[in-house]
Image: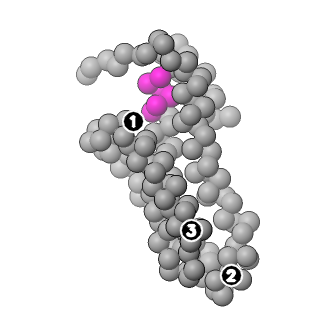
Amino acid sequence: MKKKKINKNVNPYLIAFSVILPTFFAVLGTSATNVAMKHIAGFLGATQYETNTVITTYLIANAMVLPLSGWFTKTLGQKNTLYLAITMFILGALLCVLATNLHFLLFARAIQGIGGGALLPMCQAVLLSTFPPEQRGKAMGIFGL
């Protein structure tokens, strides 16, 4: 296996901030919907049970992509996979804003979940490849924070 070279000219903490920020939004996207459930139900004229599927759709899409993120990285490369995940998450978020009915919102949340599911492992992979081996524990501590 080829060992990756670590670029000494780039501040690893700047990269850490750059990849943790979109991951924070992915985690926020998971929990923020719980708070807005009554408003979503009222806006879309749906029952509470129907709007619970908004959370479930995101989580299922998220869980489906998690094990595939390694394959995406091997196929597309680490940077391209991260860019694709961020793009999918943002696209899904924009579509959620534009949703006028429950079915379109579920579709948008699935797209957002696909992007969000790839963000968590990609962030960790980028951090591990950015920090030297003796600082990887610190990098994962930053991620956990």
Where is 139 relative to 103, above or below?
A: above
Q: Position of residue 129 (x, y in %)?
A: 44, 24
Amino acid residing under circle 2? Phe
Amino acid residing under circle 3? Cys
- Answer with left or right where residue 117 lies relative to residue 42: left
Q: Tell me, for residue 96, which label it has, or none.
A: 3
Q: Which residue is mark 1?
A: 79
Label 3, label 1: how far apart the Cα atoms are: 26 Å
Exactly how many numbered labels are in the figure?
3
Q: Main secondary structure of the magenta part?
A: helix
Amino acid residing under circle 1? Lys
Q: Position of residue 19 (x, y in %)?
A: 54, 36
Q: Is residue 70 visible?
A: no
Mark 3 or mark 1, which has the lower sequence index? 1
For the residue pair 51 and 10, the one nearer the viewer reads as 10
Region in magenta? 125-130
Q: Position of residue 67 (x, y in %)?
A: 39, 49
Q: Tell me, for residue 43, which label it has, or none.
A: 2
For the residue pair 112 and 132, the one nearer the viewer reads as 112
